[in-house]
Each structure stands twice: as structure tokens, then as C-alpha cells.
Amino acid sequence: MSQQRKKLVVGNWKLHGRLADNAVLLDAVAQAASRLPEQVKVGVCVPCPYLAQTQTLLAGSVVGWGSQDVSAHLQGAYTGEVAAEMVAEFGATFAIVGHSERRAYHRESADLVAIKAGRALTAGLTPIVCVGETLEQREAGTTEQVVGVQLDEVLARLSLEEAARIVVAYEPVWAIGTGKSATAAEAQAVHAFLRKLLVARGAEVGGVSVLYGGSVKPDNAEELFRQPDIDGGLIGGASLKAQDFLAICNAAAATL
Ligand code: PEP
């Protein structure tokens, strides 16, 4: 089934960036992406203050862009929140929701993440729904249970038509920013499980892209992306270095 799905590589800049640095990075990404086969799609999820700059610098390029979160609310007295509709106004197409850093540091529940995914879809954005287990949960043998509940909470709130428009990112918490990626076999096993859950919702939902995230680097990207149920990557640290991010995009192209 993965043969028919395109590869998708999305950078998550987290809380990084300055106008001058962003301009150099975005230019390099736009240029390199234009040379990739059209079956490889590239995106960057930037801090919200940089959405306008990103929209300007990526206009007309093949690179998509988006935010790293959206509010569960449409509008109102929610100081500091950014609505999905606001993000969409900048021409964005992606919004990460449920990143483990938000689940951990902002106590986001599975239910809240599901509401956010719905808000993103209603605004016309593709939510990149992150799921992943902690080291304790993996060692306790509960990985499938944890990621299964995280995904099911989101799917339960969406119509089949909406569910078919999400992207899932499997990001083991112990692999994020640690330099210790899951092995290709470990990642593939969880991706196969997630794929089974998606397929159980019907053919349309079964075709959803499932990305791997967690210390993806130029030297491990290709092996990860060659796994049958891994459709690309969500890239944190390495997305801030043009050379590394572009090498990871090229690794995706090499697997076609
Ligand atoms: C992430 O933040 O989504 C991520 C995968 O980070 P890193 O690539 O740095 O592990």
C-alpha cells in the first residue's frame, strides 16, 4: 500500500528561528525542493510570528508550511492562543497537533488534541497528529495501547471524510531530540500497528500518511523511509540545518 502513498517530509522548527536565519533556510529549502520528484512533498512548521515571512518567501514554491499547534477555540477570551483559521489565513496547509512537548509541558489530553485536529480540518489545514509512547511505557510493554488510544481519540471525533485528511506522526517520546532514533524495525512495527487501526476505518482512512519522527538524521533517514509503513518524517533538530534537512528530503526521494 505504501507504494501508492507519496513521501512527506515536514520540518518542525520548534521554538527556533530569527528573521535573518529563516530567510536563508527557507530559500535553501525552496530551491532544493524544486529539484525533488513530485512524489516527495516537503513542508515546514514554523513559530506563528514567522508565518507571514514564510508565506512571502515560499510563495510560488512547492514547499508547504504551517504552525506547530492550533487553539481548540475558534475565537474569544483566550489570551495567547492562535486559531486554526488565523493560521490558514497565511496560506498555511499544515498544523501539528498533539506534539509530545505540548502533551507534556501543557498537559494536553488526548481529547484536547482531538478537538484541535478537528479545528485544523475545519479551517482547511492538514493536522499532523503526533502520537508516541514514553520510555517507561515502552519498557512496560504498553506502546501499542498508548499510541492506539491517542489515535483512536482523534479518529472517534472525526467523520470518515475528515479522518482521511489527517497525517499521523509516530514520535516515540524517548527518541525526540535525544539523538537516539528508534531502529527502522522498531518504528516499522508501530507504524504497521497504526496502519492496521487506520485501515480498520475503511480504505480512505487506511491511505493516510504515517510519518516517523524522533532523531531522524541524514544517516538514518533512508533506512527508516524504506520501511513499508513509513511514509516520511517529521524532523525537529535536523530541520534547522539546511544541509541536513535537504539530505533527509533526498533520502525520501531515494526510496521511490
Ligand atoms: C520533533 O520535534 O518532532 C522531532 C522529531 O524532533 P527531533 O527530530 O529533534 O528528534
Image (cartoon, helix red, strand yellow):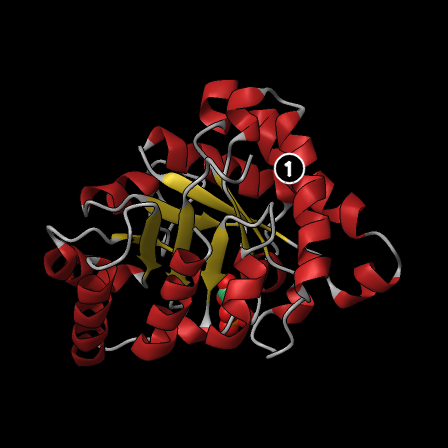
Camera sees residue 122? yes
Residue occupying the point 35% across, 75% down: 240
Relative placement, left or right, of 226 versus 60 is right
Residue 6 lies, in percent from the top left, at 41, 43
Q: Residue furthest right?
A: 140
Residue occupying the point 28% across, 46% down: 38
| Mark 1 secondary-structure assignment | helix
Camera sees residue 158? no
Q: Is residue 141 above or below residue 219?
A: above
Relative placement, left or right, of 138 versus 127 is right
Residue occupying the point 16% across, 80% down: 20
Pick whichever, 105 or 229, lies toward us.
Answer: 229
Identify residue type, mark 1.
Arg
Residue 53 lies, in percent from the top left, at 15, 63
Residue 48 lies, in percent from the top left, at 29, 59
Classify mark 1: residues with Cα within 10 Å, few (<14), some (14-19) or many (20+). many
Q: Is residue 195 above or below residue 247?
A: above
Q: Is residue 192 above or below residue 139?
A: above
Q: Quadrant of residue 86?
A: top left
Pick whichever, 227 or 205, lies toward us.
Answer: 227
Residue 131 lies, in percent from the top left, at 62, 50
Q: Quadrant of residue 245?
A: bottom left
Q: Is mark 1 within 8 Å of ligand 1?
A: no
Q: Quadrant of the N terminus?
A: top right
User: What residue is pinned by disc 1?
Assistant: 195
Residue occupying the point 18% across, 75% down: 19
Instruction: Give the tally of numbered discs.
Output: 1
